[in-house]
């Protein structure tokens, strides 16, 4: 345990490349020019801010299950200038999948660079990341600990790993790295399962799609997931030198019936080793308990998270982790097509689904939930829930939702109170959150199936105090994925976990954000790094972005 003098903390802050705004300021570090604040708490501002991305299913009509999966988005700082950039995955016309004639229009993934003035520019071609495969999800991580994040994209067909060259460009190293695969991959996550300081990769595979299979319930329009065989997921061990080894079977990952959608990784049992949550479509979920880096065993039924509150296997979409009730234990939220599940950690590796008593289920059941993330949108010190919604097999829109956390006991749907956006109907899929303008509150981006995406600016969250940590591992992986962070402010403790993939097919800001309510300083922050080291800083001022390097 070490005490860090304020002078050193100031030096660390300067090294972030970001300056903290004044306390409770509603202005970003560099003032945005577009568009004007309309008074809503959450305001949709794209495409006025330069985010012109439009998702495509690759064809003129949705004809099969693969096209319903949609795409994801990630906030990342690819050029390390201290501002979040945005990358989205896209579908494309694909032989053997798309029906009808090729329109001739090219659809690619897109990368938008943050211009630090509230607007973005399309740098896809310049950066070399315009993958033309049928894109699904993505996950970002620094695989070689050089300080620049890599991007992994899951596709229907070969997946893509883009190596960050550190000069604003990327190189496709998928085949050389040994992580291309050739399945229908959906979710994926970077994590360090053996705590050797190098990020490993878990890829969730979906169905063995057969375009010739035609038996289905007519109102559905096409066959559902149970019409096809599932595909075994893949676990890749990082060997160093940008090379990976497939260790799926050797590490005990065996789920031949799985139809993986969302993938999440966190140490939810507190033993210091990161576990894996696999949200499966129409199948029980897999909860792979980490055997101290030597293997995995499925504890889904034992934990109580294999099924929902009714004891059923659901159409599971995404998973996220947070301590929503302030007891110091990591809880789990899983979105699905009905009531969703809020798995409250009871300790000892046992969870209880609290979605109904918490108030979430009745409001959630009116929509089909896809990407869901724990976010403290109003910085009151309690993590809330965002849920992107949209129909399963038809391009029918639904309103997205925000559930406000009421002191860790209940959640209430307050979406309509937050702005006109939450009265819009979109076919939502992936979503990511982060502080794109460094003004102290969390903004978001939602990928809408076969449509223009929605960039959501938070106009009022920084009316409360906050703090953001940029963690840099040295003995641990540089991204500090798997770190557990505990803070204390105004006699109240919060716990957060540094994770990679968040929600459905997407990833939030790599920095860890905490709302502080009215508290103007932190008593302490304590970090348990993946290496096992414990680091403590005391007497920190609120309303700053602070870089903390593992010592």
Image (cartoon, rainbow, N blue to C red):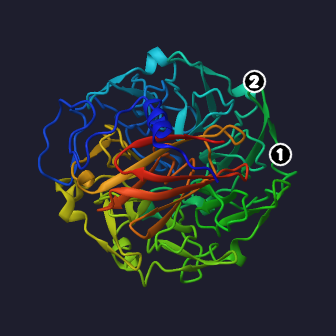
Does 443 sit left or right of 307 as displayed? left
The C terminus, quarter of image? top right
Tell me if residue 152 can be seen.
yes
Q: Choose the circle earlier in sequence order: 1 or 2.
A: 2
Q: CB atoms at circles 1 and 2 under 8 Å apart?
A: no
257 or 275: nearer the viewer: 275
SS at mark 2? helix
Does 336 sit left or right of 266 as displayed? left
Q: How many marks?
A: 2
The N terminus, quarter of image? bottom right
218 or 337: nearer the viewer: 337
Q: CA distance from mark 1 to mark 2?
A: 17 Å
Residue at image position (50%, 43%) is 5
Image position, residue 523 (x, y; %): 46, 60
82 or 95: nearer the viewer: 82
Tell me if residue 390 can be seen.
no
Query: Could you classify mark 1 by the number of other residues whose Cα lies within 10 Å: few (under 14), some (14-19), or many (20 or more)?
Result: some
Q: Residue 132: which numbered mark, if any?
A: none
- Would you place residue 148 above or below residue 393 in this image? above
Image position, residue 363 (x, y; %): 33, 74
Residue 152, located in which quarter of the rendered image?
Answer: top right
Image position, residue 337 (x, y; %): 45, 67
Q: Which residue is mark 2?
A: 176
- Would you place residue 136 above or below residue 422 in this image? above
SS at mark 1? loop
Does 185 sit left or right of 514 as displayed? right
Q: Which residue is mark 1?
A: 247
Query: Could you classify mark 2 by the number of other residues whose Cα lies within 10 Å: few (under 14), some (14-19), or many (20 or more)?
Result: few
373 or 272: nearer the viewer: 272
- Would you place residue 497 above or below residue 284 in this image? above
Residue at image position (69%, 29%) is 144
Does 495 sit left or right of 239 as displayed? left
């Amino acid at each position: 345990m070490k005490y860090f003098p304020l002078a050193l903390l100031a030096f660390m802050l300067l090294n972030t490349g970001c300056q903290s705004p004044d306390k409770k300021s509603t202005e970003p570090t560099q003032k945005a020019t577009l568009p004007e604040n309309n008074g809503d708490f959450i305001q949709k501002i794209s495409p006025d801010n330069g985010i012109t991305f439009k998702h495509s299913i690759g064809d003129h009509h949705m004809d099969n299950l693969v096209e319903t999966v949609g795409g994801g988005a990630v906030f990342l700082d690819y050029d390390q200038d201290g501002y979040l950039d945005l990358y989205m995955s896209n579908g494309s016309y694909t032989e053997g999948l798309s029906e009808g004639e090729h329109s001739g229009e090219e659809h690619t993934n897109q990368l938008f660079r943050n211009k630090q003035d509230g607007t973005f520019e399309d740098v896809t071609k310049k950066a070399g990341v315009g993958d033309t495969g049928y894109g699904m999800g993505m996950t970002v991580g620094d695989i070689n600990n050089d300080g620049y994040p890599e991007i992994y994209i899951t596709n229907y067909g070969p997946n893509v790993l883009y190596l960050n060259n550190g000069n604003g460009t990327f190189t496709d190293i998928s085949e050389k790295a040994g992580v291309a695969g050739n399945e229908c991959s959906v979710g994926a996550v970077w994590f360090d399962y053996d705590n050797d300081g190098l990020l490993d990769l878990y890829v969730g595979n979906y169905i063995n799609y057969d375009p010739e299979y035609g038996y289905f319930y007519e109102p559905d329009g096409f066959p559902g997931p149970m019409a096809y065989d599932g595909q075994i997921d893949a676990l890749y061990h990082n060997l160093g030198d940008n090379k990976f080894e497939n260790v799926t079977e050797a590490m005990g990952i065996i789920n031949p019936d799985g139809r993986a959608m969302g993938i999440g990784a966190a140490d939810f049992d507190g033993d210091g080793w990161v576990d894996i949550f696999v949200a499966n479509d129409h199948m029980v979920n897999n909860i792979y308990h980490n055997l101290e880096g030597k293997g995995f065993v499925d504890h889904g039924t034992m934990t109580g998270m294999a099924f929902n509150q009714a004891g059923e296997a659901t159409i599971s979409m995404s998973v996220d982790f947070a301590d929503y009730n302030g007891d110091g234990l990591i809880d789990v939220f899983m979105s699905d097509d009905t009531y969703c599940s809020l798995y409250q950690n009871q300790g000892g590796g046992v969870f209880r689904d609290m979605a109904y008593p918490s108030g979430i289920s009745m409001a959630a059941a009116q929509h089909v939930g896809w990407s869901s993330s724990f976010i403290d949108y109003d910085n009151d010190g309690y993590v809330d829930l965002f849920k992107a919604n949209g129909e399963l097999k038809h391009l029918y829109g639904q309103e997205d939702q925000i559930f406000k956390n009421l002191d860790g006991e209940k959640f209430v749907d307050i979406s309509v109170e937050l702005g006109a956006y939450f009265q819009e109907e979109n076919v939502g899929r992936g979503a990511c959150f982060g502080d794109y303008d460094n003004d102290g509150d969390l903004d978001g981006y939602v990928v809408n199936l076969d449509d223009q995406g929605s960039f959501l600016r938070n106009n009022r969250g920084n009316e409360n105090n906050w703090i953001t940590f940029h963690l840099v591992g040295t003995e641990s992986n540089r991204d500090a994925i798997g770190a557990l962070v505990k803070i204390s402010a105004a006699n109240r403790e919060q716990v957060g976990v540094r994770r990679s993939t968040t929600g459905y097919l997407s990833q939030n800001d790599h920095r860890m954000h905490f709302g502080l309510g009215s508290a103007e300083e932190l008593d302490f922050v304590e970090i348990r790094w993946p290496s096992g080291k414990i680091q403590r800083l005391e007497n920190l001022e609120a309303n700053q972005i602070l870089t903390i390097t593992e010592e």
